């Protein structure tokens, strides 16, 4: 996967995470407690995908430089 694709995935999942945080807050304050775990679960999965993608990007970006030196 190209390095640009990593950044697209990272930014997309971060945007999704911010939206889910906003929706979770709105649902909690609106007393729609049955929706809160769903939005929180989506945000959690999005954060995990972001972290995994970042680690893969870092390995692809900096792993190449170490092996070529």
Image: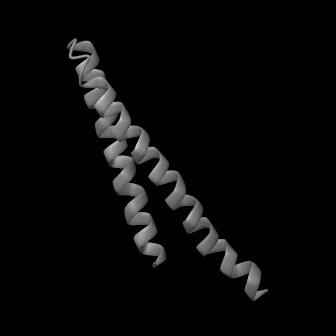
Q: Is residue 66 left or right of residue 42?
A: right
Image coordinates for residue 43, horizontal then vertical, percent: 37, 39
Q: Which residue: 43% across, 39% down?
A: 44
Residue extending farthest to the right is 69
Colour mode? one colour
Q: Which residue: 41% across, 45% down?
A: 45
- Asked where in the image residue 34 lies, by quadrant, the reply is top left
- Which quadrant is home to the C terminus? bottom right
- Asked where in the image residue 10 lies, by quadrant, the reply is bottom left
Image coordinates for residue 65, horizontal then vertical, percent: 70, 80
Q: Which residue: 36% across, 31% down?
A: 40
Residue extending farthest to the bottom is 68
Quick check: 63 above or below 28? below
Quick check: 31 above or below 56? above
Image coordinates for residue 19, horizontal then vertical, percent: 29, 39
Quick check: 62 above or below 38? below
Q: Is residue 47 left or right of residue 30?
A: right
Q: Is residue 41 left or right of residue 68?
A: left
Foreground: 57 or 32?
Answer: 32
Image coordinates for residue 22, horizontal then vertical, percent: 29, 30
Q: Which residue: 61% across, 73% down?
A: 61
Q: How many marks?
A: 0
């Amino acid at each position: 996967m190209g390095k640009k694709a990593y950044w697209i995935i990272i930014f997309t999942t971060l945007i999704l995470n911010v939206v889910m945080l906003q929706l979770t807050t709105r649902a909690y304050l609106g007393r729609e407690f049955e929706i809160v775990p769903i939005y929180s679960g989506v945000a959690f999965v999005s954060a995990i995908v972001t972290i995994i993608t970042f680690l893969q990007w870092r390995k692809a970006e900096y792993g190449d430089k170490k092996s070529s030196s």
